[in-house]
Image: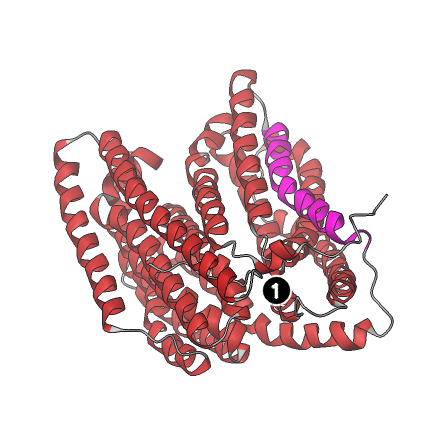
């Protein structure tokens, strides 16, 4: 019997275009994750109360921050794995060896970050006024979060390996199931009057499912991978060197999204901090959606050259801009309706600040692809330094804006630097790999922007006539229909280009890309 775990990865997985499939699952997973981040939030408060859930929110934020602090190793894994040629006779052995190196590095990182968590976070909790009814749950909460942190860090390694193999859809499918499982757990806790411990266990189980699925997917392809002799010198050290550069950007972006909240709290007060935290969650959700839509193009951009690479870049830009504009429409048109339905009328005062989130969404949608090109085809240090520059501008801007007592100015200061950095990103991206943008592309993008502006006006009028919930439903249905039609066109063109590439290469399929 053949051991499929040690057999080479099928050529279809690494050579056949999967752009359409990956975009579909990133689209589905992105919006189900938004569902988990945003829509389940009020239900959690209803189950255990605002104070009790706040204790878990603080704990979750800590493990999330540490999990995301992979110091650029994840991007380094994707880039290194994609660099191994498919037609190399020893490709599978090299990949298997690199998998062993990557998992070993992340195992050390998981141990260090988990130890840091257990050493520091309990001390931080001593400064928090924990409700009397929840003090008995603190120890179990800390243990559950620590275990989740450890396996989540390892899961980032496995997820990055799957990205490098052009199979991001595996983790995305698991994420969809995890969010649905969390919702099902909430549905059980409400009638059973579950407490904080039960809620934490439901959330931790949901967080652990994607890492477990990713580990199993990597195991099926490579078994218990072990580094080859000399692998640390040939693969490990270059990964750390590359990641040391990429870490500047990844840690800077973490600071951009996390640190402004700590400025808002002592300057604008806790109510404003609560509203700001909710709006930043909206911003981060939009960022995740744009990222998951853009990342399926990483593999073809890395593998292709010349005109084909330029086509990948143009299509990726079109798709990212389309998603960014669609996310911006409801934020500009019906911010009050969104906040009232989501968090109640008491948060409606933050509607102007929610509209400012559009600056960050557009910055992400326009900057994602250039950043991807710089990281994969150019100098990753440039991309990292641009992110560092955004952080350097953001923090003093937020500090100055906080002195005005205006939440919308604080939000604008938090997200506008992302948009201001786009011209710099485009300049260095074009130097790394020209996109060959034509007048037809510019006209398409301009029409998309004009259409979005028109949609904002339409939905503003709809919001004045229909109830809030109905307005949001109509907006979501209309935007969903537009994206489905666009996605079908992308898939159709992707199949046509893939068939043409197969004929040109004598039956061997090469990575192709959809054309809009």
Residue range (magenta): 196-224
Q: Position of residue 471 (x, y in %)?
A: 22, 34
Is residue 388 among what the camera can see?
yes
Establish if 390 lies above or below 187: below
Q: Nearer the viewer, residue 439 or 335?
A: 439
Image-based side of 157 in relation to 406, left or right: right
Q: Position of residue 73 (x, y in %)?
A: 64, 66
Q: Which residue is mark 1?
A: 78
Farthest bottom residue?
431
Is residue 258 among what the camera can see?
no
The answer to whether residue 183 is magenta is no
Establish if 357 lies above or below 344: below
Q: Quadrant of residue 247?
A: bottom right
The type of colouring in the image is: secondary structure
Image-based side of 446 in relation to 513, left or right: left
**Number of callouts in the render?**
1
Q: Quadrant of the N terminus?
A: top right
Q: Nearer the viewer, residue 482 or 403?
A: 482
Establish if 373 lies above or below 50: below
Q: Position of residue 339 (x, y in %)?
A: 30, 40
Task: Examine the residues drawn in magenta and state their main secondary structure.
Answer: helix
Image-based side of 442 in relation to 311, left or right: left
Image-based side of 248 in relation to 367, left or right: right
């Amino acid at each position: 019997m053949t051991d499929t775990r040690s057999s080479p990865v099928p050529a279809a997985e690494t050579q056949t275009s999967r752009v359409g499939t990956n975009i579909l699952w990133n689209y589905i997973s992105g919006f189900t994750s938004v569902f988990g981040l945003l829509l389940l939030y009020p239900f959690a408060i209803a189950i255990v109360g605002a104070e009790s859930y706040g204790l878990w929110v603080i704990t979750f934020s800590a493990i999330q921050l540490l999990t995301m602090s992979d110091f650029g190793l994840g991007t380094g894994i994707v880039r290194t794995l994609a660099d191994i040629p498919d037609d190399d006779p020893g490709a599978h052995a090299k990949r298997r060896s690199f998998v062993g190196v990557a998992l070993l590095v992340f195992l050390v990182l998981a141990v260090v970050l988990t130890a840091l968590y257990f050493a520091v976070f309990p001390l931080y909790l001593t400064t928090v006024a924990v409700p009397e009814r929840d003090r008995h749950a603190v120890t179990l909460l800390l243990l559950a979060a620590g275990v989740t942190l450890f396996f989540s860090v390892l899961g980032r390694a496995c997820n990055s390996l799957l990205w490098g193999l052009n199979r991001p859809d595996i983790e995305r499918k698991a994420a969809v199931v995890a969010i649905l499982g969390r919702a099902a757990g909430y549905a059980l806790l409400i009638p059973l009057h579950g407490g904080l411990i039960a809620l934490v266990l439901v959330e931790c189980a949901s967080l652990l499912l994607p890492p477990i699925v990713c580990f199993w997917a990597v195991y099926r392809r490579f078994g218990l991978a072990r580094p080859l002799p000399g692998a640390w010198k040939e693969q490990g050290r270059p990964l750390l060197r590359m990641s040391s550069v990429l870490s500047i950007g990844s840690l800077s972006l973490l600071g951009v999204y996390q640190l402004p909240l700590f400025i808002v709290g002592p300057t604008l007060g806790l109510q404003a901090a609560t509203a700001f935290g909710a709006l930043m969650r909206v911003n981060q959700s939009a960022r995740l959606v744009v990222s998951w839509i853009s990342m399926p193009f990483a593999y073809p951009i890395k593998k292709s050259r010349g005109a084909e690479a330029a086509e990948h870049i143009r299509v990726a830009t079109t798709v990212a801009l389309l998603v960014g504009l669609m996310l911006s429409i409801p934020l500009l048109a019906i911010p009050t309706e969104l906040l009232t339905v989501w968090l109640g009328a008491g948060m409606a005062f933050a509607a102007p600040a929610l509209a400012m989130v559009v600056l960050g969404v557009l910055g992400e949608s326009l900057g994602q692809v250039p950043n991807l090109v710089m990281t994969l085809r150019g100098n990753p240090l440039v991309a990292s330094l641009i992110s560092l520059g955004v952080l350097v501008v953001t923090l003093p801007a937020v500090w100055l804006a906080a002195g005005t007592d205006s939440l919308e100015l604080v939000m604008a200061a938090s997200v506008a630097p992302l948009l201001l950095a786009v011209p710099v990103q485009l300049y260095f991206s074009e130097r790394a790999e020209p996109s060959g943008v034509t007048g037809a592309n510019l006209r398409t993008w301009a029409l998309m922007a004009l259409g979005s502006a028109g949609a904002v006006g339409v939905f503003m009028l709809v919001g004045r006539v229909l109830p809030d919930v109905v307005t949001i439903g109509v907006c979501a249905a209309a935007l969903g229909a537009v994206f489905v039609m666009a996605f079908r066109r992308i898939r159709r063109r992707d199949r046509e280009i893939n068939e043409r590439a197969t004929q040109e290469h004598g039956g061997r399929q090469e990575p192709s890309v959809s054309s809009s």
